[in-house]
Image: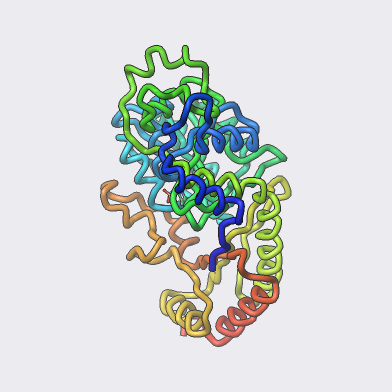
Amino acid sequence: MQESIPEAGIERAVEIMRSGKLHRYNVAEGETAEAALLEREFADYLGVDYCLACASGGYALHVALKAAGLVPGDKVLTNAFTLAPVPGAIHNAGGVPVLVEIDENYCVDIAHLESLMKTGECRFFMISHMRGHLADMQRIVDLCERHSVVLIEDCAHTMGASWNGKASGTFGAVACFSTQTYKHMNSGEGGLLTTNDPEIIARATMHSGSYMLYERHGAGPDAAVFDDIRLDTPNYSGRMDNLRAAILRAQLPLLAENCERWNKLYRTAERGLAQISGVAMPRRPENEYYVGSSIQFRVPAFDSTDVAEFIDGCARRGVELKWFGSKDPQGFTSRYDSWRYLGEAPVLDNTLEILRSTFDMRLPLTFNTDDIDTIVQIIREVVRGIQPGE
Ligand SMILES: *Cc1c(COP(=O)(O)O)cnc(C)c1O
């Protein structure tokens, strides 16, 4: 259920393999590496000054925190509903995640966020735009400014999205994107870190393992910015290679069109699901341009037995749903209280209540709207066959 890599990317990747020059710093005089070209192109696409290509999205998040000045023991606010690489990146950077409730639209709960910011204990907020749901970014930015909190955006699901016409990834001090296979551009594994701050990009570049070759970056700051940073910043080796950069460069020009293709599938699924009695859909605000590469819905009346029956019933008819309500992590999904390394989990009643009845489905571009109609019909029939609470 994956689209192939555009032919131009495959051809370029083969050329690179024939040359043997896969490493981003393996360039002849006057030559620009594929990774450096990708950095320039992605920065231009997003409308920011700097971009760094990394080994994964989770790695970019880790390095973003370090480059933004996190020191071990610093508390980092983050949504309780996110993917495991987010708390993992905070932990890896030596930070202490402080989990924030979500609302019924899968966005961070702004009232809870504000109450946590008011304690004055958290210097960072790593907002995860989980499953592409954008919170009111103007309010988030205002709150961060008022409480001197550094905002870092996890844009793993919002590459191509925007709020009030401003691109997701341009609201905070740093943003991180993933180019892992299940995201909006596919290089197997990969990450992109973006910022307008010359010192943050210089530190991130050194962290990523640039040795003293930082001048070979396509979207980096003046060499003078590295004067002290190059000696003060440890190498955490996590570069992107030219092969992955080549296949991403071929996908970037298709991104906007692909986002529209996802949204067509999303709107079809949303319309169909909303008509099923007992199903609740998240509200998508006017200000949000989302990328509907997945869809979430709730069946609030279901208890845990109904949930199991529903997932089974759909699976038997070929519709694969994910459920974030399980205490026991499965596949890609895990609930926040299963991240045991964080110590005792807070009880976040709203988040638990929402996740308890939330189902999640990918909308691969290999599907068409007829496929979506078929899937919605199956979901409708399975929901109808279950008598909640019996
Ligand atoms: C995929 C993902 C990441 C980063 O993932 P990598 O696999 O490390 O590239 C971060 N946050 C969210 C919400 C994700 O889904």
Q: Tally the marks.
A: 0
Rendered-image quadrant of the N terminus: bottom right
Q: Please determine whether, in this image, residue 61 is positioned above or below residue 14.
A: above
**Residue 81 visible here:** no
Position of residue 274 measured from the top left corner of the image (x, y, whole percent) = 67, 70
Q: Please determine whether, in this image, residue 24 is positioned above or below residue 29.
A: below
* Nearest to the observer: residue 315 or residue 189: 189
Position of residue 198 measured from the top left corner of the image (x, y, whole percent) = 51, 21
Residue at the spot 31% in from the left edge and 26% down from the top edge: 234
Q: Please determine whether, in this image, residue 11 is positioned above or below residue 333.
A: above
Q: Quadrant of residue 263?
A: bottom right
Position of residue 182 measured from the top left corner of the image (x, y, whole percent) = 50, 58
**Residue 4 visible here:** yes
* Nearest to the observer: residue 227 or residue 122: 227
Position of residue 135 measured from the top left corner of the image (x, y, whole percent) = 59, 45
Give the side of residue 84 with respect to residue 162, left or right: left
Residue at the spot 58% in from the left edge and 38% down from the top edge: 169
Residue at the spot 47% in from the left edge and 41% down from the top edge: 242
